[in-house]
Amino acid sequence: MHEDTRTELIRKLQRLEEERYILREGERLQDFTCLMLRHIGDPESELREHIYSTFHIWLKRDNKFSSAEMQHLLAVLMDDRHLFYRIGSEDDHSVLTRAFAVLPIVLIVQRHRNNSFLTPNEFQHLHHSLLRYYQEEKDLRGYLAVEGWAHAAAHGADALEELIRCPESDNAVQREVLEAITGMLHNGVRIFDEEEDERMASIVDTMISEALLPQQEIADWIHSLSLCTEWPDTRAQRVARVNGKNFVRSLYFRTRAHNDGNNLILNGAMLTAEAKLNHFTEAN
């Protein structure tokens, strides 16, 4: 039965692409959505990408989902069969379901930012779920040789960037997100090599450019990333130091691109942290 529905979905998505994602008479959005959710973490990368492309077209370009439908879809995406499917597992296919459940969540949060439809309770559930996911995801592989992209750390960062831009996200939420980034950089196992640092830097760049937190508070947080240099010389310390160094560099050059001369505190904090995290400078 599973393979039958998979084959059916592949056929339908291929036809949809050919027909510019326009449903035929008698077809229902919900029927496609159920199939796409069932196979959202398929080991075949082309099918995962095709499912995401369809969600992208229908959620962002065509606005096919009503507010009620998006509320329901979001709740399903954040359940134990999708975002939290076998959370904590490593080196298996379950990460594909979790990481690719995040991507349509990003699109739904974008819709909410542009035209609010989530209730306060639904937003709180979203907020807590995204933070919990970023804290509990342990499979941090980027690109898999056979299955293609997993990229959970990058996809989760995209969702957190949308979260902090929501009007409901107060300073407490911003601080929780910074703490989650620290946890990801200090994951103890993986030095990121698929530009996950850039996706995380986008979150903090948005905080800076949109003044979501005081500059001094962000500067203090940047400084805190360099404190791992005082830890014992272990693999976990090296992971934290190298990830932190790469992140600070990404953020520094990102912010320079739109520097208006008012980021002196932040520039100083980033340069100081990078020098401390970099074992190849004269200071070290």
Image: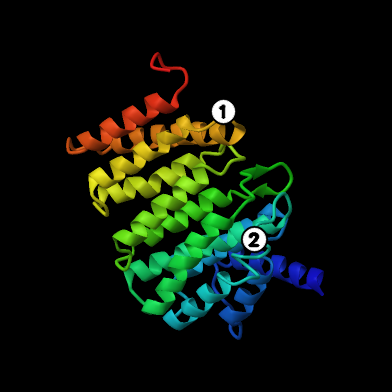
Q: Compared with residue 129, is residue 93 higher up or lower down, i.e. above or below?
A: above
Q: Residues within 10 Å of mark 1 (few under 14, many from 20)?
A: few
Distance from the alpha carbon under mark 1 to that under mark 2: 30 Å
Residue 83 image position (x, y, % from top left): 59, 65
The amino acid at mark 2 is Ile
- Residue picked out by circle 2: 87
Q: Compared with residue 86, is residue 253 higher up or lower down, i.e. above or below?
A: above
Residue displayed at 38% across by 39% down: 224
Residue displayed at 47% across by 78% down: 71
Q: Nearer the viewer, residue 240 or 7?
A: 240
Mark 2 residue element: loop
Q: Compared with residue 191, is residue 159 higher up or lower down, i.e. above or below?
A: below
Residue displayed at 61% across by 33% down: 235
Label pair 1/2, CB-CB below 8 angstroms: no
Q: Residue furthest top?
A: 282
Q: Across the whole image, how many numbered discs are drawn on residues? A: 2
- Residue picked out by circle 1: 233
Indicate which disc, 1 or 2, sits on the residue closer to the N terminus: 2
Residue 30 image position (x, y, % from top left): 59, 80
Residue 82 in sight:
yes
The amino acid at mark 1 is Asp
Residue 61 in sight:
no
Q: Nearer the viewer, residue 92 or 259?
A: 92
Left-right relation of 39 to 271: right
Mark 1 residue element: loop
Q: Residues within 10 Å of mark 2 (few under 14, many from 20)?
A: some
Dividing the picture into quarters, in which one does residue 63 lie? bottom left
Residue 147 image position (x, y, % from top left): 71, 49
Label 1 or label 2, whichever lies nearer to me, is 1
